[in-house]
Amino acid sequence: MRGMSIPHRNLYPCLVLLAIGLLILLASGPATLAQSPTETPQPLPPAHLGYGTHIGPYLPAPLETITGLGMDWVKVYDAGQVDDYPTLRVLYRMDLDWPNDWAYFRSEVERRTRELVQRGVDAIEIHNEPNLSLEWPRGPNAWEYVQMLRVAYGIIKAVDPNVIVVSAGLAPTLTTPDRMAINDLDFAREMLENGAAQYFDAFGYHPYGFNQPPEADPYQNELVFRRTERIRALLDEYDAADKPIWLTEFGWLRTPAEGGLDCTGSPALSGFEWMQVSGAVQADYTVRAFAYADRYWPWVGPMFLWNLNWQMYDYEIEAACSHLRWYGILEHDGAPTVTYRAVAAMPRRVSAYLPQVETVPLGADGLALPLDAASVWSVPLAAFCPRQVALGEFEVRNTGWPAAITFDVQPQNFPMEGAPQIFVSTATARFGDRVTVYADVSYTAPGDYLIVVNLSGLFGERVIAGNARLLLQVENSPVNCQ
């Protein structure tokens, strides 16, 4: 344990008091299941998820245990643990206190960031669940949190603009009479009204499932996994539609009874009794949650399952009935639970998280056309067509970058006699934009021409580039004029 104690206050997941649980039961209707938000299943979006889990501070978690689970991300709390996972992407939670001395605060954030960057961290989450008094002892205050986020964001980006900054994962909860817990939707709205969207690359959220299945309707049940959709609606309302949501904690609580414990009345489980599910249900809901987000939430990035190994703490550190233990997917001796095995075996589509942008051609009905291996689609066009005939359009899609990136859109025209001249509908584009490609073939000889439209933009100092390509087939017949 490196001679250090576990910082209990900052390690709780979304701690919801018994009073909140009673409010939920009163506010929620019966659980409803929905296999999808739409009647007809739609094609899967491009891969966009990262798969991660939480590592207990100062607990050994061998790399092979994580890779065996099929994870490409980990979330850690101890800077030294970043070194343990050189082949994985790492999210570090930087817990911060409201500063009494802003100069010291700035220097400390800079020092910690430089250490993390040197160790190779990929993303930093700024604090944890500030809508709970447990994590914001001054009493939850969205304005205060945004001020701290603003300063920390500027310092982190000054140290390394490529580090992904994630806002503190909000706890899904209802406002309690003493206001020691603030409704996450209200808190998020206040954050956005105070300009928070300028100071994060991804919005952090903790959509715990409580005792409901992952498909439960968020408008009929207050606190469910799909409450994330209501957060998404808020971001869209406040012109932050380009900001992805990272699920920096989520999970279901396995009942301690499966470990032979009677935790009735235990203070370590107080307020959480009503959330308990069996190990088989925990496994099923977890796998279904990953699948649901993959299919229906293209705006979600990495998902971090809470948690891997809190069960492995000594009992003098974490009580046997502690809810923190029973979210874990390893047993006390490190043996895999049914949830570990289910997650390890589930299908997944991992986002590349590479500096690239994807362009997808669209048909007349707006649906994506199939691409061949070379990402080329064909358009027949007659040599007798008038100037600037529309060939088609493509959509700029995000392959995992959590940022609002503006791309320069530049058609590649070759200065050679007889080549078609290519034009585009816009000189710049962002994720989600559609770009129409036009051609002037007035002086073009019949034949096949590879047309390329290049896109390039910056994420920090890193160039993100991509292109759309089409095969223009110029014919002698005017029948293909559009």
Image (cartoon, rainbow, N blue to C red):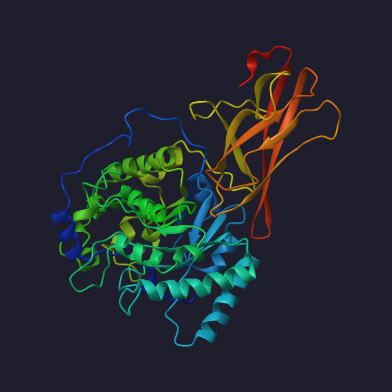
**Up-down: is 184 above or below 432?**
below
Q: Looking at the image, is 246 positioned above or below residue 137?
A: above
Q: Residue farthest to the front?
A: 386
Which residue, as the protein is rendered here, is positioned at the far bottom? Answer: 101
Name the foreground residue: 117 vs 216: 216
- Residue that appears at 46% across and 33% down: 44
The residue most toward the left is 26
Looking at the image, is 422 positioned above or below residue 64? Answer: above
Q: Nearer the viewer, residue 51 or 155?
A: 155
How many numbered callouts? 0
Whole-percent x, y for residue 469 in the image:
68, 32
In the picture provided, is 262 more to the left or to the right than 165?
Answer: left
For the point 33% across and 55% down, the residue is 327
* Image position, residue 239 (x, y; %): 44, 56
Which residue appears at 20% of the width and 74% of the height? 178
- Residue 442: horizontal and vertical position, in percent? 76, 24
Instruction: For the C terminus, give its image quadrant.
Output: top right
Can residue 206 be spotted in the picture? yes
Inspect this view and state whether residue 13 appears: no
User: Where does the image place residue 462, in percent across and percent down from the top left?
Assistant: 68, 56
Toward which corner of the image does residue 208 lie, by quadrant?
bottom left
Query: Is 402 on the left-hand or right-hand side of 32?
Result: right
